[in-house]
Image (spheres, rainbow, N blue to C red):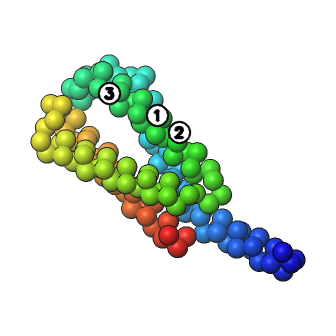
Amino acid sequence: MTTSQTAARLGTAATNSSAARPLRLFLGLDAVVTAANGLIYLAAAGPVGDLLDMDTTLLRGIGVFLTVYGLLVGLLARQDVPSAAATKVVIEANLLWAVASIATAIFGWFDPNTIGTVWIPMQALVVGAFAVLQISGLRKLGN
């Protein structure tokens, strides 16, 4: 490889890294919000369960999932240029979560009270917004 080819590749890598900043930000925010939500469900399942009128065992299970998922998304966000395939998995998981949450609210699954019925679609909107932002960031990378 010639010096000019090496310089061109380094320039492309720097450009990709710069273009990846919005995606990394959106993945990072998703990771922080998701892991924090999971930790709250784990640490305060009783009070949160009382507030939402939901089963504490269910909330703890959701808390474990969200904490692990948030940590994995955080690892993805730390990459200079996050993997397109892994980012697409995160986007699809977020969209699935948002749709499942809306269905939960519409069909009254888990029988939450009014606060829970309001909370569920509100968090679905946040998760859906992360997916839309991540799609936008991925498109800026040409994927």
Determine the residue located farthest toward the front in the rendered image. Answer: 1
The quadrant of the rendering that contains the N terminus is bottom right
Residue 99 coordinates in the image, percent (x, y): 25, 51
**Amino acid type, residue under disc 1 in the picture:** Thr
- Asked if the residue at tag 3 contacts the one at tag 1, i.e. Cβ–Cβ closer than 8 Å, the answer is no
Question: Dot 2 corresponds to which residue?
Answer: 71
Residue 19 coordinates in the image, percent (x, y): 60, 69
Question: Dot 1 corresponds to which residue?
Answer: 67
Q: Is residue 97 left or right of residue 65?
A: left
Residue 40 seen in render = no
Residue 53 seen in render = yes
**Mark 1: secondary structure:** helix
Q: Is residue 60 above or below residue 2?
A: above
**Amino acid type, residue under disc 3 in the picture:** Leu
Circle on res. 29: none
- Asked if the residue at tag 1 contacts the one at tag 2, i.e. Cβ–Cβ closer than 8 Å, the answer is yes
Label 2 crowding class (10 Å Cα cut-off): few <14, some 14-19, many 20+? Answer: some
Question: Dot 3 corresponds to which residue?
Answer: 59
Determine the residue located farthest toward the left in the rendered image. Answer: 107
Q: Residue at x 44, y 51 (%)?
A: 90
Q: Is residue 137 above or below residue 34?
A: below
Q: Nearer the viewer, residue 42 or 93?
A: 93
**Amino acid type, residue under disc 2 in the picture:** Leu
Q: Is residue 56 left or right of residue 42?
A: left
Q: Nearer the viewer, residue 104 or 29?
A: 104
Gap between marks 2 and 3, in whole Å? Answer: 18 Å
